[in-house]
Image (cartoon, rainbow, N blue to C red):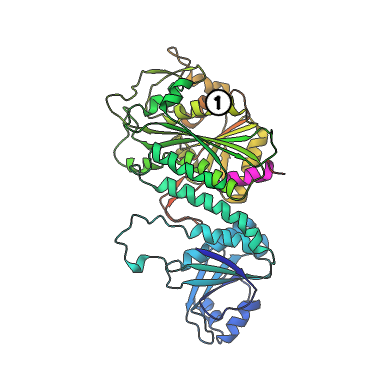
Amino acid sequence: MQISFAALEMPVSGAVALLVEKDKPLAGLAAEADSKTGGALSKAMSASRFDGSAGQTLDIVAPNGLSVDRILLVGLGTAADKNTQDWTEVGAAVVAALLGSGSAAVTVLAEAGADAVAMAEGALLRSYRFDKYRTKEPESKKPTLKAVTFATDSKDAEKAFAPRKAVVDGVFFTRDLVSEPANILHPESFADRIGELKDLGVEVEVLGEKEMAELGMGSLLGVGQGSIRESKLAIMVWNGGNKGDAPISFVGKGVTFDTGGISLKPGEGMEQMKWDMGGAGTVVGLMKALAGRKAKVNVVAVVGLVENMPDGNAQRPGDVVTSMSGQTIEILNTDAEGRLVLADALWYTQDRFKPKTMIDLATLTGAIIITLGHEHAGIFTDNEEIATQLSKAGLDTGDKVWRLPLHKNYDKMIDCPTADMKNIGGRAAGSITAAQFLRRFTNDVPWCHIDIAGTVWSEKDLPLSEKGGTGYGVRLLDRFVADNYEG
């Protein structure tokens, strides 16, 4: 999708989007357009249920008196009450309404008070489709909208949009990764895709099974031992801050397909487990976003890439593995594999890079969906400052989070007579005991775990994305970094 900015005036061709406040008469250029059409816009509003409420759209095709193809009325609600994220969703609503309409271009008249940059970000986000494998899709189903222009009085909109576009590029990279089938995206090919970040100045290093075995990563390696695909650990470094400053770090679970292993999942819905690498996908997209906008901060990202398959060499319930930290783990359920991957990835990150902050992301538990549905990701941390910062970033970007507790009494639920710990704590408080497990591998570095199992994928269209991979977390963490770690 081509996004551009122009002077605030009525165009002579293409589609036009006019912003309408709830229960207010048309004003400005919208009033002029209504006059030139002989009141057709007002009549259309009266004849429908369109009153300018937020989220409403009304499409008026080939209006008399104007040379444009169509006019799209877009409801704002009360403009004065809108924050940046609200304006982002307005821009997305324009694209959602016109993507397959037949129009190839639309001009959005961003009059006084409208945030053209936020709308442009939303428009670009909503334009994404993962359709590379649709070889028989009829032309009537394909998008027609190719360009969105924001007509605005702002003189610096284009400059302000450039870093936001870099972030959207990161979101799209995440959506691409999450959407790929597991026969295409496996640990080796995922590592190859991460290598593309070198073009942006990111340093990339990939460890194979031999190197990880030498480091003692028995926890991570145990998960992938039933697959013919070699497990990988990918390390990304962005040095955009002051030389010598301790980095912030992000760690991602990258299970490129999760059958559950010997503790086999039910067959129904198992195809969705191609996106069990969503945590790693978000981390990689974040690194693309930060490098793309030249973030002034030092960042390290580490993702553990494995495939969890059942075969004659697969890990068994009852096995005991030794993690890189030296702590031993009894495997009671091979489908609680993500925490085993993160255990070694977290320890490796803090041991090698000595970060000031460590955030991990994972599609870790089904229990978080039972708790929070698909509206919020769950966050777990002992650090009040990190919790507050992430909560604010979530509200500002729409990637919402909700804090759940950590407590020593939950920690007791993963104690084990056979080893230092077991990899599950039972049905009760499943997301919390998973977080308690991870905390044992942070070595007291300020840390937060984000469980994104309910937010990485959507079975319905959302304001900023169509059904499929959402790219959740990239904008959240980019804002978290920008607000708290960049000068």
Q: From the viewer's perspective, is residue 226 above or below residue 102?
A: above
Residue 377 at x, y percent in the picture: 52, 41
User: Is 235 situated left or right of 445 in this image?
Assistant: left
Residue at image location 65% in from the left, 65% down from the top: 114
Callout 1: helix, strand or loop?
A: helix
Percent across and percent down for residue 56 are: 52, 66
Residue at 49% x, 52% y is 172
- The percent position of residue 374, horizontal first and vertical second, equals 47, 45
Question: Where 252 falls versus 77 (above or below)?
Answer: above
Q: Could you say which quadrant of the image residue 487 lies in?
A: top right
Residue at numbered disc 1: 439
Residue 350 shows in this picture: yes
Q: Is residue 335 left or right of residue 411?
A: left
Is 314 rendered above or below residue 25?
A: above
**Mark 1 surroundings: few (<14), some (14-19) or many (≥20) residues within 10 A:** many
Query: 37 or 428, which is in the foreground?
Result: 37
Residue placed at 32% from the left, 62% from the top?
A: 137
Residue at the right extreme of this rendering: 487
Magenta stretch: helix, strand or loop mostly: helix
* Magenta-drawn stretch contains 457: no
When the figure is inspected, residue 80 is found, relative to residue 67, above or below; the finding is above
Number of residue marks: 1
Amino acid type shown at disc 1: Arg
Observer able to see residue 473: no
- Of all residues shown, which one is farthest toward the left? 312
Closer to the camera, 362 or 227?
227
Residues in magenta, as a range = 474-484
